Image (cartoon, rainbow, N blue to C red):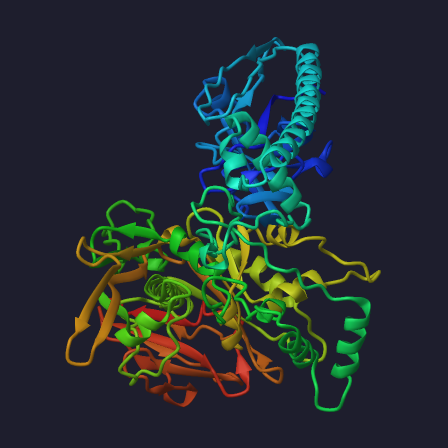
């Protein structure tokens, strides 16, 4: 199969914008290897995988042949290439072995299409576009690379041309290496002759007498010898003193290799100190003595033999990351929830509803000569006011000055935003969990929790899955059977815990075969868009799942109430103080748009409440085991002994049923009634 495009993923010998230089054989071992093709190194989303790339190790770099898959992003990327909107590739690699800013070895993990490549030699060539009529168009680009090195670029439109270019490149490389070896031999002979003719010449004098080309060859040979781990001996550098030597490191802390000829002073080689087999035997014997350690034994040997910098054998501990690792709850669900809710530029949310399910709201038949009755239904409204949610931190300036390993302020601000988002998402889903009288509690009349919202908006389904004869399948069945009560927009999202997700996936049929191969199959059966694990739900032992289309939940904030960060300096206490806050409101705005599945005690008994009887003038209650009837307005108990309860003409009386201790209702539906007296 012919590649969709090809080009250099990276070039050897060219300095990248991050300061690294990739050596010719750094990725030679990955020739013919297949790696993922990704958009902009987006590793956190599988949709960013555009296809795969086949690597080809060449003398002057790594060439890549790209093959797109059939995803929408891959098709979009193909269009970008066709219109020349992008023309660069970049690589992501790890297991790097780096010395003095030169990458000697590594492993390419993926090749990415990028808007701007880090390596100045990374440019896409030979873009092949396939049209609907099966015709193919090869797009050729030219690259002008200004790197200070002489580079020959060749473009090809066919596979044969590519092979010719590769052969020519290999021949040129071999000729160059051969000439370099011959030139090196000539330079060595010239140096020997110069020393023989004039013993008083210093190495610096010899170096200064070289041509620029000879100096480049010498620099290359010294670098290769150093990269291969060989020690470059400077026995002839008798004319430089120890005082003239300096230790320098680059911006990354790597030791920099020096050109010993570029300083004006004289150089004297230190006497090399090596460890023989007998020395090592003596060190190990000393370390084996009671109370001794290997470090102490080596240090003892070093002191007695004049070895300096022994600490290089036992370096200080190094952090694996630049910032402290945060230990906390998994918060992947937070971004899902906050991205899914609907945002409003108004902080006060008002909703109005009319109940058309009562019998009085129905249309009626007409008999000639009779009175036409008015339709009756009740309109209700709900207003949600905003509240402020904040997080505050402080840092002593002394600590800020002393912490040099990482940017503690940036890290602290990121932590504050993370925790603010989690708290807001938690308040939206289930509430913040604090007691009502806690001064830090988020007002639930301002951020209305989905799980405990009024039954007009959230339907509660109760299941008993803890008795001996029950299983988690009853919860799944209850969600399917009561789906008629969910009237939200489109498909809902199901929020639950990892514990229940595991139970869903472990369900087995009568033949002890797993019912679901993946979580997607569970979601399909439940008719939900996705199933999202929420770690904080582990704290709510009675909640099995929450189903809601987040588009039906509105978060409102005015222009001044958006998330804002403030900082100040307290000169009296020498402290920096930081505050992040938002002022917003949140509520469900669509009736019956959410469903919460709750677990009852394993000993609880299911009972279905019967509706009271009404004859137009009075309400009659029939006593029922496990059911308590109350007046909805006064909360007074209503029973058969007090029946019938009179209802005046035009008066409306509400009756609600609640389960007695040890009993439960299947759902919050059909447990409340209203009766209006007839004239």
Indicate the position of residue 523 as horizontal and vertical percent values: 60, 53
Q: Give the camera-side residue of 447 and 96.
A: 96
Image quadrant for the C terminus? bottom left
Indicate the position of residue 21 as horizontal and vertical percent values: 54, 39
Image quadrant for the N terminus? top right
Indicate the position of residue 27 as horizontal and vertical percent values: 67, 38
Using the image, determine if residue 525 lies above or below residue 115.
below
Indicate the position of residue 531 as horizontal and vertical percent values: 55, 56
Q: Residue at x 81, y 74 (%)?
A: 281
Q: In this figure, what is the number of numbered marks?
A: 0
Relative to residue 384, is residue 27 drawn left or right?
A: right
Q: Give the camera-side residue of 228 and 610.
A: 228
Can residue 296 be seen here? The reply is yes
Q: Residue furthest right?
A: 511
Using the image, determine if residue 580 lies above or below residue 542.
above
Q: Give the camera-side residue of 591 and 423.
A: 423
Can residue 380 be seen here? The reply is no
Q: Residue furthest left?
A: 572
Q: Residue at x 74, y 82 (%)?
A: 287
Res. 132 image quadrant: top right
């Amino acid at each position: 199969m012919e590649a969709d495009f090809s080009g250099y993923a990276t070039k050897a010998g060219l300095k990248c914008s991050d300061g690294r230089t990739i050596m010719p054989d750094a990725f030679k071992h990955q020739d013919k290897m297949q790696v993922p093709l990704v958009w902009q190194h987006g590793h956190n989303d599988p949709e960013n995988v555009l296809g795969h790339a086949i690597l080809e190790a060449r003398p002057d770099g790594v060439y890549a042949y790209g093959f797109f898959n059939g995803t929408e992003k891959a098709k979009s990327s193909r269009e970008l290439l066709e219109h020349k909107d992008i023309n660069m590739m970049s690589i992501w690699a790890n297991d790097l072995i780096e010395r003095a800013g030169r990458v000697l070895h590594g492993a390419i993990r993926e090749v990415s299409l990028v808007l701007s490549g880090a390596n100045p030699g990374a440019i896409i060539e030979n873009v092949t576009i396939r049209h609907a009529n099966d015709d193919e168009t090869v797009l050729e680009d030219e690259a002008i690379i200004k790197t200070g090195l002489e580079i020959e670029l060749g473009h090809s439109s066919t596979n044969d041309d590519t092979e010719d270019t590769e052969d020519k490149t290999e021949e040129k490389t071999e000729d160059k290496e051969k000439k370099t070896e011959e030139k090196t031999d000539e330079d060595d002979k010239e140096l020997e002759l110069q020393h023989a003719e004039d013993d008083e010449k210093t190495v610096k004098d010899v170096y200064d007498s070289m041509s620029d080309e000879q100096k480049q060859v010498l620099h290359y040979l010294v670098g290769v010898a150093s990269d291969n781990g060989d020690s470059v001996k400077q026995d002839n550098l008798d004319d430089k003193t120890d005082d003239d030597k300096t230790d320098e490191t680059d911006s990354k802390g790597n030791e920099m290799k020096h050109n010993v000829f570029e300083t004006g002073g004289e150089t004297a080689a230190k006497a090399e100190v090596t460890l023989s087999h007998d020395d090592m035997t003596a060190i190990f014997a000393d370390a084996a003595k009671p109370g001794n350690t290997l470090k102490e034994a080596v240090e003892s040997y070093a002191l007695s033999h004049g070895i300096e910098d022994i600490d290089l054998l036992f370096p200080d501990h190094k952090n694996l990351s630049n910032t402290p690792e945060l230990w906390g709850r998994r918060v992947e669900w937070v971004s899902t929830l906050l991205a899914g809710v609907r945002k409003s530029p108004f902080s006060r949310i008002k909703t109005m509803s009319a109940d058309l399910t009562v019998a009085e709201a129905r249309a009626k038949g007409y008999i000639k000569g009779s009175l036409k009755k008015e339709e009756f239904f009740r309109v209700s409204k709900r207003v949600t006011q905003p509240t402020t949610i904040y997080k505050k931190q402080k840092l002593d300036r002394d600590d800020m000055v002393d912490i040099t390993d990482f940017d503690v302020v940036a890290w602290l601000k990121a932590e504050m935003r993370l925790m603010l988002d989690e708290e807001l998402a938690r308040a939206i889903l289930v509430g913040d969990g604090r007691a009502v009288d806690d001064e830090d509690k988020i007002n639930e009349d301002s951020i209305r929790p989905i799980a405990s919202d009024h039954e007009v908006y959230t339907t509660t389904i109760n299941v008993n899955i803890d008795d001996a004869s029950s299983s988690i399948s009853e919860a799944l069945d209850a969600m399917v059977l009561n789906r008629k009560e969910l009237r939200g927009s489109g498909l809902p999202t199901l929020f639950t815990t990892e514990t229940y997700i595991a139970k869903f996936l472990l369900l087995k049929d009568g033949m002890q075969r797993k019912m679901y191969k993946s979580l997607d199959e569970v979601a399909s059966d439940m008719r939900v868009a996705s199933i999202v694990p929420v770690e904080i739900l582990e704290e709510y032992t009675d909640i099995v799942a929450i189903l809601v289309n987040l588009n039906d939940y509105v978060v409102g904030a005015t222009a001044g109430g958006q998330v804002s960060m403030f900082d100040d300096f307290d000169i009296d206490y020498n402290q920096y103080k930081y505050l992040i806050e938002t002022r917003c409101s949140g509520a469900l705005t669509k009736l019956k748009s959410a469903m919460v599945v709750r677990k009852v005690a394993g000993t609880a008994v299911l009972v279905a409440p019967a509706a009271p009887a009404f004859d137009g003038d009075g309400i009659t209650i029939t006593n029922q085991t496990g059911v308590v009837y109350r007046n909805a307005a006064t909360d007074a108990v209503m029973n058969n002994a007090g029946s019938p309860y009179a209802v005046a003409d035009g008066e409306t009386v509400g009756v609600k049923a609640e389960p007695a201790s040890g009993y439960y209702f299947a759902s919050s539906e059909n447990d409340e009634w209203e009766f209006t007296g007839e004239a």
